[in-house]
Image: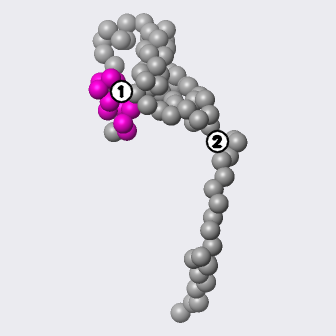
Amino acid sequence: MGSYRFSNPARKVRQTLSARKLMVTVFWDAQGISLIEFMTRGTTINSEVYCRTLKKLKRATQNKCRGLLSSGVVLLHDNARPHTAVRTG
């Protein structure tokens, strides 16, 4: 059998914020990307922010595919709190 080395369990790891990390929300359909929204650093995604994003998506969809909204659009969401809030329903 081989020998194994284990790291020191008492060693603490410090977390540092990366200046390069950026949150982005992307919506796409069969024709390609519909909306890309870059979030301001430190922004928390809550129902208010998500509703603003959905309004931008609606405008982008209206501009991209005239008549599509009258025939219906289906969005696939996970169960994150902003997606399931009464306001976004």
Q: Nearer the viewer, residue 5 or 81?
A: 81
State if disc 1 and disc 2 touch (CB < 8 Å): no
Q: Mark 1, residues whose alpha carbon is within 10 Å: few (<14), some, or many (≥20)?
A: few
Q: Which residues are magenta?
A: 80-89
Residue in view at x 61 percent, y 84 percent: 5
Residue in view at x 70 percent, y 42 percent: 19
If you read the primary sequence from the N terminus, does the residue marked by circle 2 or circle 1 appear first? 2
Please state the horizontal and vertical placement of residue 54, each as a whole percent of the image.
43, 20
Q: Quadrant of residue 77?
A: top left
Residue in view at x 47 percent, y 11 percent: 59
Q: Nearer the viewer, mark 2 or mark 1?
A: 2
Way the structure is coloured: one colour
6 over 65 or under it: above or below: below
Q: Amino acid at mark 1?
A: Leu
Please state the horizontal and vertical placement of residue 57, each as a whole percent of the image.
46, 18
Query: How many marks are shown on the rendered structure?
Result: 2
Q: Which residue is mark 1?
A: 75
Our reading of the magenta stretch's main secondary structure is helix
The answer to whether one can see residue 31 in this image is: no
Question: Is 81 a magenta residue?
Answer: yes
Image disc number at residue 21: 2
Marks 2/1: CA–CA distance = 26 Å
Q: Secondary structure at mark 1?
A: loop
Q: Mark 2, residues whose alpha carbon is within 10 Å: few (<14), some, or many (≥20)?
A: few
Q: Nearer the viewer, residue 61 or 80?
A: 80
60 over 1 or under it: above or below: above
